[in-house]
Image (spheres, helix red, strand yellow):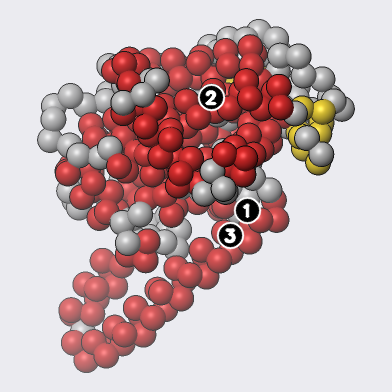
Amino acid sequence: MKSIMVCHCIGICISCSSNIETSQEKRPFHRDMGIYIRLWRMFKLWFVFFLGLMVILETGVQAWSTEGHVMVCQIAQGLLEPDAAHAVQMLLPDYVNGNLSALCVWPDQIRHWYKYRWTSPLHFIDTPDEACNFHYKRDCHDPHGLKDMCVAGAIQNFTTQLSHYREGTSDRRHNMTEALLFVSHFMGDIHQPLHVGFTSDEGGNSIELRWFTHKSNLHHVWDREIILTAAKDYYGKDMDLLRQDIEANFTHGLWREDVTSWTDCSDMFTCVNKWAVESVNIACHWGYKDVESGETLDDDYFNSRLPIVMKRIAQGGVRLAMILNRVFGDSEEDVEAAST
């Protein structure tokens, strides 16, 4: 998979800033230019962020909705241990004030930019129609057959990059901020069942239907419709209340005894395979089941699938925290990225 070099800047992370600062130290009479450099950086930060927002509004949501990704990252950040919390804060740009969820949709925002177009296949896995299984060597590739170019391969790759964080600033091989954002986003994607869907219908994107009274498609139902309908019907459109209910279910509720099994992870290759298999099984037995193009999905579908969506968001958040705690913590229990 294509690795990300440090000078592969994204606007939110000015990776080459150390070179500028060193140059200023050597030429003291240019120190007054520092304020202009900082202003220019700030302008680029907000300009890139604004462009990214426009892109996602124009192209539509391609993964968990903004709300889904935000909840995954909020759940994860709330479970971070001190070392991991500090590392995350250090890697995030200052303007988000340490809030990981503020940038969890960034990979969706830039996937259609020329510079990042290569990341587009990393958001999903296409599996053979009706097979209802996932095999890494068979399924993890882009439309041109390039290996490891799928969401499972991406999580392995960027987790490996993050594991170099402990080596300090002398390790300039990777852009750690980008790696953090990609891992955080793709952990949401791999837990969205229709992101491990069938090839012919593009994970439900081509199955057009109606969600209650408006047009939608099956993929979008799982990305966003179920979440927004739940927020409207049960939480007064307050996403924080919905997230708090999800958290309550795994801290002292329905899923409390399952959390240990969720975080059972000896090496990253085994883990991502397991999570992808979970998703394709759910897609087969709950996503596609009894759904035909052109029909209307309403209360029966919504009520039976909502608990599954909530659980997948919970699992994505808990497992993201597990990864970040291991790669950034002092514990020797690292998540190893086994080769395929």
Whether 193 is drawn above or below 18: the answer is above
Label 2 crowd bin: few (<14), some (14–19), many (20+), radius 10 Å? few
Disc 1 target residue: 56
Q: Which mark is residue 53?
A: 3
Name the residue tied to disc 2.
Answer: 307
Observer-nearest of 293 and 270: 293
In the image, 209 versus 158, the foreground residue is: 209
Give x and y (percent) for residue 162: 30, 39
Of the 4 image quadrants, the one containing the C terminus is: top left
Residue 310 image offset from top left, x and y in percent: 50, 29
- Residue 324, position in %: x, y? 28, 36
Q: Is residue 103 visible?
A: yes
Please name the amino acid that badge 1 sits on: Ile
Where, by quadrant of the figure, is residue 261 drawn? top left
Q: Is 98 placed left or right of 111 in the picture?
A: left
Of labels 3 and 2, the one closer to you: 2
What SS does tag 3 mark? helix
State how far apart marks 3 and 2 are (Cα): 30 Å
Residue at the far right: name it. 294
Give yes or no for contact between labels 3 and 2 (Cβ–Cβ under 8 Å): no
Secondary structure of the residue carrying tag 1 is helix
The amino acid marked with disc number 3 is Leu
Q: Amino acid at mark 2?
A: Pro
At horizontal 63% and vertical 25% (from top left) the residue drawn is: 303
Tell me: 115 left or right of 264: right
**Other-residue count near label 1 (Cα within 10 Å), few / some / many at <14 / 14–19 / ≥20:** many
What residue appears at the point 17 percent right and 37 percent down from the top-left corner?
Answer: 329
The local crowd at label 3, few if under 14, some if 14 to 19, many if 20 or more residues have their Cα within 10 Å, is some
In the image, residue 98 sits, relative to residue 37, either above or below, namely above
Q: Is residue 158 visible?
A: no
Are the residues at dot 3 and dot 1 in contact (C-beta closer than 8 Å)?
yes
